[in-house]
Amino acid sequence: MGKISPMSSKYIVHASIEIEGVVDRPDVIGAIFGQTEGLLGSDLELRELQRGGRIGRIEVNVDTRSGKTMGTIIIPSSLDKAETSIIGASLEIIQRIGPCNAKIKVKNIEDVRISKRSFVIERAKELLKNLMEQVMPDSQELAEEVAQSVRVMEIKEYGRDRLPAGPNIDDSDEIIIVEGRADVLTLLKNGFKNAIAMNGTSCPQTIIDLARQKEVTVFVDGDRGGDLIIKELSTVTEIDFVVKAPDGKEVEELTKKEIHKALRSKVAIEQAKLEMVDTSESIRKPTFQKRDAPRTTTSSRPVPVRPQSRTPVARTQVQVVAAKATTVEKEKFGELLESLIGTKGAILLDNKLNTLGKVPISELSTTLTSLKGSVYAVVLDGSVDSTLASVAEKSGVKHLAAMDSKVKTSNVSVMTVAEI
């Protein structure tokens, strides 16, 4: 009996068979050939079609249970659609197999080419995905790794203090002073070759000499230590500009985008000094200022500023009494707190409790400062500390709703989950 390769078949006839009795597989195949013989003419004779390779090997699978036999019939075909359909329909005329009644039903005729086409499409998608995820990123990462390694190799020791520095310190008209070697490496990796490290909090003589010749930008961490370094440098040498990393971050932790953004927002040393003075004055706001103010008029210029700084405090304290959160506000804060659980984010609200935006907690202080007077309430997935309370007070925020609070007294209404 001839065979047809499954790869060359175009269609596959799938049929089911039910027999009221016990028969074997050869009985079913014999009935198919015997009862269709001469039915469709010589051109569609199953034996001749199989010899010529137009019909493949007929597969019959049967299973006998409780005196009945059930199974499937599979016939591969390389005929056209019409001829294959005729062959399939001819199977349904078989009503007896051996001594038993039988019923054959063609379930479907499968177009093998559609299945192959679907396989090709799905496989092509997988191959393209692998190409994009593995091949292309690998080459890009390789190029970036080589470029970064070359930049790191360019770090050198500069001056008699042997300070870590980039290769362009002598050639550049501008230099960037950072705190340590890791900060110089971070700037080198991101293309800045004119950085030099202090290697401590005291200013080395090498940097003092450089500052006399070049334009100096100080790039420090976003913490209290960064402020101290700025004060130290400003007293012993000449500084032109100051750049601070975002609050709570160190220079070595910044991404390329964050470094460029920080350097674009650099401020003159005079402005930086004023900001540090304002910050220190806001920290020293206790009541003794009221008693000392009349006695310090001859020794300090900023005396007019201090009454101005006290006025908002008094105004805010008056508002705190009237700014108790209403029931509706508490319900709103509670819903937002529940939605923020696990996000480490903060939602800013206006006085109509409309959402102004959502920011990470790490950027909350900066955002409140930039939106001064526009934010009515802040709901955050975190804890309220004295620094955040102070920033909120300066920015005109009336309510802070948080998971926890470390603040005992504040001119801003602070609510926790338990209180809401």
Image (cartoon, helix red, strand yellow):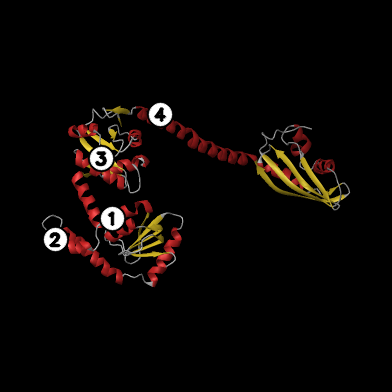
Q: Which residue is mark 3?
A: 218
Quadrant in the rendering for residue 386: bottom left
Q: Position of residue 282 (x, y in %)?
A: 24, 57
Please tell me which residue is depicted at 10% across the width and 57% down the height of the picture: 298
Residue for point 25% across, 43% down: 230
Q: In the image shown, does 164 or 119 lie closer to the viewer?
A: 164
x and y percentages locating residue 243 in the rendered image: 26, 43
Q: Could you give the CA–CA distance between mark 4 and mark 2, rounded to whole angstroms?
A: 65 Å
Quote the CA–CA distance across marks 2 and 1. Answer: 33 Å
Nearer to us: label 3 or label 4: 3
Which residue is denoted by mark 4 in the rendering? 146
Q: Secondary structure beneath disc 1?
A: helix
Amino acid at pointer 4: Val
128 vs 153: above or below: below
Disc nearer the start of the sequence (1/4) = 4
Query: Which element type, helix, strand or loop, lies under badge 4?
Result: helix
Q: Earlier in the sequence, mark 3 or mark 1?
A: 3
Q: Tell me if mark 2 has few (under 14), some (14-19) or many (20+) residues whose alpha carbon lies within 10 angstroms of its own.
A: few
Q: Residue at image x 26%, y 30%?
A: 169
Q: Which mark is residue 199?
A: none
* Figure check: 259 above or below 1: below
Whether residue 123 can be seen here: yes
Contact, mark 1 vs mark 4 (Cβ under 8 Å):
no
Q: What is the secondary structure assignment of the residue under circle 3?
A: strand
Q: Earlier in the sequence, mark 4 or mark 2?
A: 4
Q: Earlier in the sequence, mark 3 or mark 4?
A: 4
User: Residue 261: x, y in percent?
Assistant: 30, 43
Q: Which residue is mark 1?
A: 369
Residues at marks 1 and 4, CA–CA distance in whole angstroms:
41 Å
Q: CA distance from mark 3 to mark 2?
A: 37 Å
